[in-house]
Image: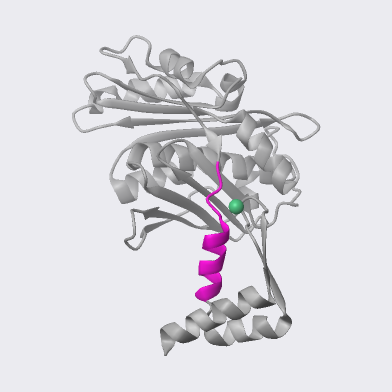
Amino acid sequence: MQDTLARATAESGRIRAIAVIGTRLVESARRRHGTFPVATAALGRSMMGAVLLATSMLKPPDRLTLRLLGDGPLGAVIADADAEGGVRGYVQNPLVALPIKANGKLDVGRAVGKGMLVVSRSMGEAQPYTTTSPLVSGEVGDDIASYLLTSEQVPSAVALGVLLRATGTVKAAGGLLLQVLPGGEEFSAELEARVQALGAISSRVEVTASADDLLRDLLDGFKNVRIAKPSPLRLRCTCSRTRASRSLLLLGTKALDDLVGDGSAELKCHFCGRTYRFDLPQLEHLRDEVSAQQA
Ligand SMILES: [Zn+2]
């Protein structure tokens, strides 16, 4: 089953819905970061959430970064997505294990803890636009819905889910964003009932072939349902040697002098694990570049 994203509208655009299926890419992220189950769930939900927000709020080539900064054992959980289905993410402490909750689910809320949800939108070269809202449960979906209501004034239902096998690998991962736009308030109660009836989104994803099927089920019976052709979702990192050099330049002359003294430097991308090595001549070149700028 391919990872897909689909959007839909209904009732003459007064209802807006986006669905994502990201089972493969969450599994790739799990393997890449070696996450334990509760970390896999938090990371996967955050990545699906970032895709939903980016798809609903941005136009290419803008990007969006979601940071869950809680006081739980996971530390920061970070996911970043573009408006074209590209996403990446990491969790500060991937090796966290917590007891399963009484309802049999992973305790993502406790693993994330209390704190803030920070959403930054990068639009071209301008400074990113950052909004902060308190985490309501640390379960990710509720936190994003609360952010959308308080910061964007859009009442939204957000369902995010990651289902794991007993071995810890990802069996299903997906998400759903439902929004009622002004003039569509009369549909709120019905939509809420539909989301409730769906049950756990991850179980639904497990038996669904594509994101547009999810939307078809959800919006069945509403008027003027329009579902766009689904598009692929991909794990995509934007790191590069040029970006790594740029971040070294930002360190300034003093820090670069220290690195020159060390003789070499390594920068590791948190998102994909790629390492960028800089040898002595390269570091000297970067230091000279900064010195010249400052002269
Ligand atoms: Zn990378």
The figure's colour scheme reads one colour
Query: Who is closer to the viewer here, 175 or 283?
Result: 283
Residue 209 vs residue 293: left or right? Answer: right
**Relative height, residue 255 to residue 217 (above, below):** below
The number of numbered badges drawn on the structure is 0
> Residue 70 placed where, x, y %?
56, 58
Residue 238: in magenta span: yes
Position of residue 229 measured from the top left corner of the image (x, y, whole percent)? 40, 19
207 versus 154 height, above or below: above
Which residue appears at 70% of the width and 86% of the height?
A: 261
In the picture, measured across the screen, residue 259 lies left or right of residue 226, that is right
Q: Quadrant of the C terminus?
A: bottom left
> Is residue 83 visible in the rendered structure shown here?
yes
Q: Residue at x 60, y 40 (%)?
A: 44
User: Nearest the camera: 51 or 175?
Assistant: 51
- Quadrant the N terminus occupies: top right
Left or right: 22 in relation to 133: right
Q: In the image, what residue occupies the spot 44% across and 22% down?
A: 230
- Specify start and end residues of the magenta stretch as a single range: 236-250
Q: Position of residue 121 (x, y in %)?
A: 38, 53
The question of residue 78 being in magenta is answered with no
Q: Which quarter of the figure has residue 256?
A: bottom right
Q: Residue furthest bottom?
A: 295
Residue at 61%, 86% in the rendered image: 257
Dominant SS in magenta:
helix
Quarter holding residue 53: top left
